[in-house]
Image: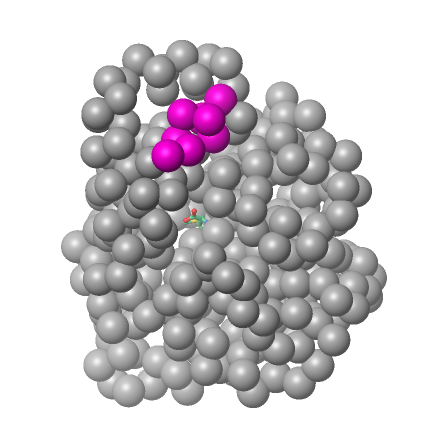
Amino acid sequence: MKPLDDYDRWADRLEDEARKVLSSEEYEHFAAIPRQGRHQQLKELLQAPIVRFSLVNEVFFRARWSEALQACRCPSRAFVLEVASGAEDCIPQAMARTHPESRYVSANLNRQLTQGLRSRTADLPLQVEVIEDDAKNLGRHLGSNQVDAALFHHGVNDVIQGILCDRHGIDTVHCNWMAVLPEMVALLRTEAAAGTYEAHVKGPFLGLVRVLQEILKPGGTIAMFHFPYQMDLDLGYPPEIYKNMIPITRCWTAELSGIGEISISGFDPQWWLFLRKE
Ligand SMILES: C[S@@+](CC[C@H](N)C(=O)[O-])C[C@H]1O[C@@H](n2cnc3c(N)ncnc32)[C@H](O)[C@@H]1O
């Protein structure tokens, strides 16, 4: 499998980045890991699929999104939307360091995970809001041409899982997401085996991207980052879909007009997709 990123580049800067993107308490824990151990964790992370959750992951994801926000040309007072954040806070954590005068809004459906996001971001020096609605309905909450960047941190697969759950009447809003995950993965497997995956997913997914396109400012960017977790593969996620989430999404979004892919050097097209609104 392709590495998630360039190990040598990140190994050189791991300690500096950790100082920038971790809180002092987090940094103390990070610094307590022997240097060799930190670098071994970095190597494993970038080799993907991701097995371990650690502070090294936090450093990489926060620092990488800081770079991605720059690549998206976010101004210092940016309006950034994240789709399907769950409780994951690496984007607001990055913004609190690089874009503290900005507004971060997450569109997130699952109630428990929203609670998690709220508590993880409560003390950040950043304006954080959650719209507890399906991102396909964002037009009801936000006007046209407002958002600088709409971001997916490992969220494309979640949106797709949500689309299939809606189709099969499975509640993903008032549930324990991890408890329902095996059922979601089983649905995906069934759809893939029956050859109905694309027919059932592509239309609603592109509908959601069109909504994002409408609320983006002209020149605004959609950035999608996806990478494999071993846990999802172990649950039986069809690997050809899961590992190629971005290349598949790229083919679908190429059909859209008024928004098109931009290539940004240093971001591997296997794992990243950037779309810029005209
Ligand atoms: C596993 S969680 C978090 C994913 C996270 N981005 C990560 O790091 O893996 C998935 C979240 O996506 C949300 N979600 C899925 N489809 C959505 C949609 N169409 N609109 C809003 N939230 C959505 C779910 O409600 C859930 O909270």
Question: What colouring style does the render use?
Answer: one colour
Any part of residue 183 in sight: no
Q: Main secondary structure of the magenta part?
A: helix
Q: Is residue 95 left or right of residue 13?
A: right
Q: Where's residue 134, x and y in %? A: 60, 60
Identify which residue, 208 or 140, lies in the foreground. 208
Q: Is residue 152 left or right of residue 186?
A: right
Q: What residue lies at 66% left-to-right and 70% top-to-bottom?
A: 276
- Please tell me how many numbered marks the rendered image carries: 0
Q: Against 43, is 147 above or below?
A: below
Say which quarter of the image contains residue 239. bottom left
| Residue 85 visible to the viewer | yes
Q: Is residue 168 above or below residue 56?
A: below
- Indicate whether 219 appears above or below 87: below
Pinpoint residue 232: horizontal percent, then vertical percent.
25, 54
Residue at image coords 74%, 75%: 278
Q: Residue at x 38, y 48 (%)?
A: 177
User: Between residues 73 and 198, which one lies in front from this camera angle?
Assistant: 73
Q: Position of residue 233 (x, y in %)?
A: 21, 58
Q: Is residue 155 magenta?
A: no
- 198 is higher (above) or lower (below) than 113: below
Q: Indicate left or right for 157 with 130 as reference.
A: left
* Rendering coords of residue 170 (x, y %): 40, 62
Q: Quadrant of the N terminus?
A: bottom left
Q: Which stretch is magenta?
A: 12-19
Nearer to me, 115 or 238: 238
